[in-house]
Amino acid sequence: MTELKTKSNNSDEILKILFLTNIISPYMHDLFSHLEKQCKKTDFKVAACAYTEPDREWSLDFLNSANYKFEIIKDAKLFRAPGKNRFFYIGGFSLIKEISKYDAIVFKGGTRFIGPFYAILGKILGKKTVLWEENTFDSTDTLLKKIVKAIYINKNLFSSFIAYGLAVNELIEKFNADVSHKIFLSGNAVDNDKFRNRYFKLFPKKDLIKKKLGIAAETKVVLFVGRFVDEKNLFTLIDSIEKIVNSGEKNILCLLIGGGYLESDLINYVKHKKLENYVKVIPFMQFSKLSMYYSISDIFVLPSRWEVWGLVANEAMNFDLPVIVSDKVGCARDLIKEDINGYVFPHKDSKKLAEYILKTMKNHKEMGKNSYKIVQNYSFNTACQTIVSSVLLIRV
């Protein structure tokens, strides 16, 4: 992998980068750890507005072993709109003193916090400013968000852009038609080795695990992993399972694993549909236990009404699972190859989703193998190289 060097290309100099983000998720922690190991010519720090956010239930123990520098911005405060799953940060101006120390500022998103202010300040100070964007036009789902994004995703604020996938690339070009040469395309990634190692450890025990969980060996398991929130569109998935059962296919079990404000509503909906034997709503669990469920599953479904990427699809593909996603999921055109490793369905169409689940059940093993091959093209090495390029190859 290319090492980061300074503008002078003097190999003895180090390029200093500040990453600004809302939180450090387990996924981003793994990526930053990889960047720290692979890019010896970097000196970077991650500044986050908070440790975690509403509806995020993962353990924060991973931060105790971080090998990179990070800080939680002491004066950044969360503001949440009443009755809505919308929130943003105010404050965070304590970083002003530090900006002069860095050659480049990389903004992981930014409209939830003080990104615009620091983008303007960075440009004034002659810093390279990089917008690391992950939203698609579909995930920018309200008029207000579209207006804010149109103002923020601006060629005058940023020296270059990192686009998480083809749909994000289109979003950036929609607002800035002449910046294609400044966009660095990068699929979102997980630690493929970590997930694959768990697959190798657990897959030989698949039948034993299913027996322990009270699932018959011949039962086809359809899996969803994520938050129980409105945008995940889980009632459509339940409706599709109802259609499958009513068609005569009884040898199926759908597992919904996550947590969030819709948990009780989902449980009640399953009861209302009399699908208790075919759909199980399971509370959130950490990956050490969750990987057991990946290993016993046959198909992964992500039915979201909007989704910036959907890293759970990467996880599932490392477990040899075919993946069915809605047309509103950000990774649909990047990760899903129709009839090869999965399908893309219209997000409101439970009938089409049911059809694709049944179709996938007939060839899930071969399609799952194809999933693994495809997801290997989306790695931390590639993501880190994109970060390198977005900083090095563009002049201020």
Image (cartoon, grey):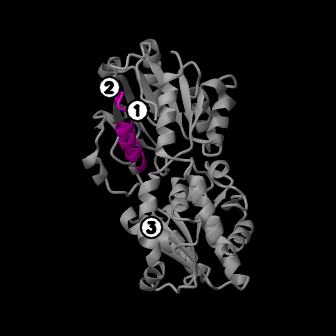
As helix, strand or loop, the secondary structure at mark 2 comes to: helix
Residue 127 location in percent, x, y?
Answer: 43, 17
Q: Which mark is residue 20?
A: 1
Callout 1: SS: strand
Mark 2: give few (<14), some (14-19) or many (20+) Cα within 10 Å. Answer: some
Q: Which residue is mark 3?
A: 200
- Kind of residue at badge 1: Leu
Q: Vertically, is 383 above or below 294?
A: above
Q: Give the numbered dot on residue 95.
A: 2
> Amino acid type of disc 3?
Phe
Residue 249, given in percent of the width and then of the height, sits at: 68, 83
Identity, as a three-letter code, of the amino acid under mark 2: Leu
In the image: residue 29, left or right of residue 67? right
- x, y percent for residue 152: 55, 28
Question: Distance between the Cα atoms at labels 1 and 3?
Answer: 36 Å
Identify the main secondary structure in magenta: helix
Are the residues tagged 2 and 3 within 8 Å (C-beta)? Answer: no
Q: Label 1: how many residues lie within 10 Å, few (<14), some (14-19) or many (20+)?
A: many
Q: Nearer the viewer, residue 350 or 265?
A: 350
- Residue at the (44%, 55%) spot, across then down: 193
Q: Would you say the residues marked 2 and 1 are in contact, meaning their CB atoms lie under 8 Å apart?
A: yes
The magenta-colored residue range is 27-43
Determine whether, in the image, residue 388 is placed left or right of residue 184.
left
Label at residue 343: none
Query: With respect to residue 142, does 39 lie above or below?
Result: above
